[in-house]
Every structure is written in structure tokens, then in C-alpha cells.
Image (tube, rainbow, N blue to C red):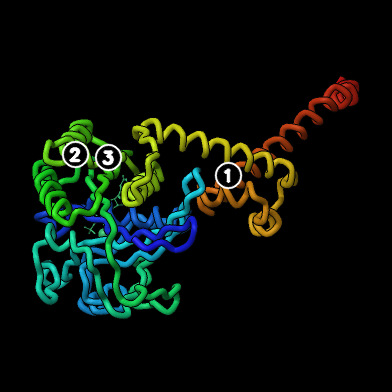
Amino acid sequence: MARKGESIRTINVAVVGLSGVEKDKGHAGIGKSCLCNRFIRPHAEDYNIDHISVLSQTDFSGRVVNNDHFLYWGEVLKSIDDGIDYQFSLIEQTEFIDDASFQPFKGGKMEPYVKRCTATKISSAEKLMYICKNQLGIEKEYEQKVLPDGRLSIDGFVCVFDVSVVPSRSIEKQVDFCAAILNNILKTKKPVVMVTTKNDESNDSFVREAHKLVQRSEYKGNIPLVESSSHENVNIDLGFLLLAQIIDKTKLRLKIPSYSEAALARKEIMDAASDAFMRLIRIHVTDCHALWSQTQKKLNSHKEWIHFVQLFGLDGTQRLFKRHIKKLKDEQMAKQVARYMEMLPDVLHDLIPVLL
Ligand SMILES: Nc1nc2c(ncn2[C@@H]2O[C@H](COP(=O)(O)OP(=O)(O)OP(=O)(O)O)[C@@H](O)[C@H]2O)c(=O)[nH]1
Ligand SMILES: [Mg+2]
């Protein structure tokens, strides 16, 4: 681990966990890419749920994949309340599958994934940072960041374990695969944190299996477990920050809330952001004919607006705006009806003598 200045430490992390052909990983991956995406680019607008796995030969040899079985996700700065900043560099160790043969691409000396993914010296000349699936083939249209010096020295690992039910993947298989990875990580003497993914769709017995795995005697209680959901953005930073603290040998360690505690805290943040956003909208948008584009231009520098878009994305923001406009229209209509009702006795009074 390199020390940058007084209070910024740089930490290089490899995210690892079950990967491979469908026979090994089942119908879907375990959530490594989504976890990396949420950690590096947490805002709703930058989060994608679909990442690269099965590729064409052209994409495999493009500069993002660069004929490797790992992705370079770039850097992110995160702070802990006690004033320490960590700059993380992140790679994801995966296994890319050829869309022609449905077998892993062959490149150089191919060790089995469980061994290869625990490498602590990573190198790939001119490799570009991965951002999203659409980037492949049109790299110039995205930020182009190169893996510095073409290499990275890994300080610690985040080992991912999926606690949701995925068709064609048995829990025993995942436990065995994960244990093999953890055993190989132990040999590197680098610290590891286990992060369970997809807790928004968790299966209780799978959650228990994950806890049982890290409690095996050979791990001597040295592997903390964090329960996360990338889709719900719950407990994402925690696993990485804990790893940084272990690497940094800090005395104080972050507390690990359970998934339900962390999800509740997250909901409170989202509710508060929604309330603040609605207050802003109520003050500034009083005309039911207000347009989304104009409102966006007018309000997008307000902190309440920015925070809400970060959490809910532009689609979510527009949905709430539309709901507000509908409410304004309903209110206007109700006022009009009330006015007509007020006038009704007079109108009737005028009409009845005529009718009589
Ligand atoms: N419900 C739920 N689904 C998730 C979550 N994270 C990932 N997924 C889904 O799981 C599938 C696989 O996710 P990836 O992140 O691509 O998995 P991976 O481990 O990177 O897969 P490979 O790199 O191909 O081994 C996708 O369909 C994701 O949308 C989550 O937090 N909750
Ligand atoms: Mg992946």
C-alpha cells in the first residue's frame, strides 16, 4: 500500500468470486460487476445492471478487455468519519466467455480461476478503464483512463458471495468455489473481506451458508462479512472501507450493520431526500403548465435537486415532477368545480323563474 500524503492512502483492491461458463456460475453472475459499478460510480444515473460477460473476439481484444480476464474499474476517493481518505483502485477478476464457442477465451498461461484471481501483481499495458457495456467499440466517446503504468499491486481482496437463488447454480458449488478462493487468498497473506450480494432477493439459508463459511476454523475469525445490495445501494462502501482499515492496521474498525439495519438507514436517507425535493418543487413549481425541461434548467443547481437525482436518477425525478404537475392540475380542477358550485344557487335562482 502506498502512502500519498498525510491523510490520503491509496489502496488497490481485487474483487473476486465465482465466475466462468454457465455450467459453473448458473444462469447469472454473482454480482461482482454491479458491486464495482456501485462502488466506483454510485449515482443512479451511472449505475448499470447489465455488464459484460459473453463477448465477441473483437471486444475481447479491444483496449478495455485487452485480452485479459480482468476489468480495470478505475479510482474512487472515499472518506471515513475520522478524517482518513482512501483512494481505491479497483479491478474485477472475471472469466470472459467467447460468444462463438461459449468457452472462456484462451490467453497465455491459463490457471484455474480460483488461483488466477488471487494474483497480487497485475499487469496489462495500455488497458482502458471499463465503464459500461455500451462503451465497447466506441471507447472514444467515453472517458479514457489508462491503467497507470500498466500494472497494479493488489493490497487486499473483496470476495463476493451471492445469497440469491440463481437457476442452475447450487449453493454447494458456490460455497466450494468460494472456499477455494479464500484458501488461495490466505496464501497471499493479503487481507480479505467477504461481501454477500443481492441481499434484496436473499434466501435465508444461503445467507446462513455465507456466515458459516467465514466462520470456518481455518479463517480464525479474520474474515469480516458485509451484507450488501448493489441494486438497492445498501452497504456498498462498507466492505471496501473495512478492508482498507485492515490493510492500514487501524485500531478503530467500522461497525457492520446487518442488511436490514443498513437498508432501513438507506430508506431514511431516501425519504429525507424525497421530502426536501418535494418542498423545493412545491415552492418553485406552482403552475400546472410548467414544463419538465424548463423546470430542470431552473432547479438543477439546487442541492435538494442534485441529491435527489443522485439517489433516484433523472427518470425517478421526472416521475415525481409529473406527479406534482398532476396534483396541481387536480387542485386547479377542484377549485374550478368549487367555484361553479358556489355559483350554482344563483344560476338556479335565475333559471327557475324562467322554468316556472
Ligand atoms: N437483485 C439483484 N440483482 C443483482 C444485484 N447485483 C447484480 N445483480 C444481477 O445479477 C446478474 C449478474 O451481475 P454481474 O454484476 O454482472 O455479475 P458478475 O459476478 O460480474 O458476473 P461475471 O463477471 O460474468 O462472472 C445481473 O443480472 C445483475 O443485474 C443486486 O444487488 N440485486
Ligand atoms: Mg462481471
Residue sitting nearer the eye, 14 or 319: 14
Residue under numbered circle 1: 320
Is residue 167 or residue 348 the one in the foreground?
A: 167
Q: Secondary structure at mark 2?
A: helix
SS at mark 3 in the image: strand
Any part of residue 66 in sight = yes
In the picture, measured across the screen, residue 213 lies left or right of residue 132, that is: left
Which residue is under mark 3? 225
- As shown in the figure, which amino acid type bears the numbered disc 2? Val
Residue visible at 31% across and 76% down in the picture: 150
**Mark 2 CB near ligand 1 (8 Å cut):** no
Q: Quadrant of residue 97?
A: bottom left
Is the C-beta of the residue carrying label 1 under 8 Å from the nearest atom of ligand 1?
no
Q: Quadrant of ligand 2?
A: bottom left
Q: Which badge, 1 or 2, is on the more N-terminal residue? A: 2
What residue do we see at 63% from left, 40% from top? 276
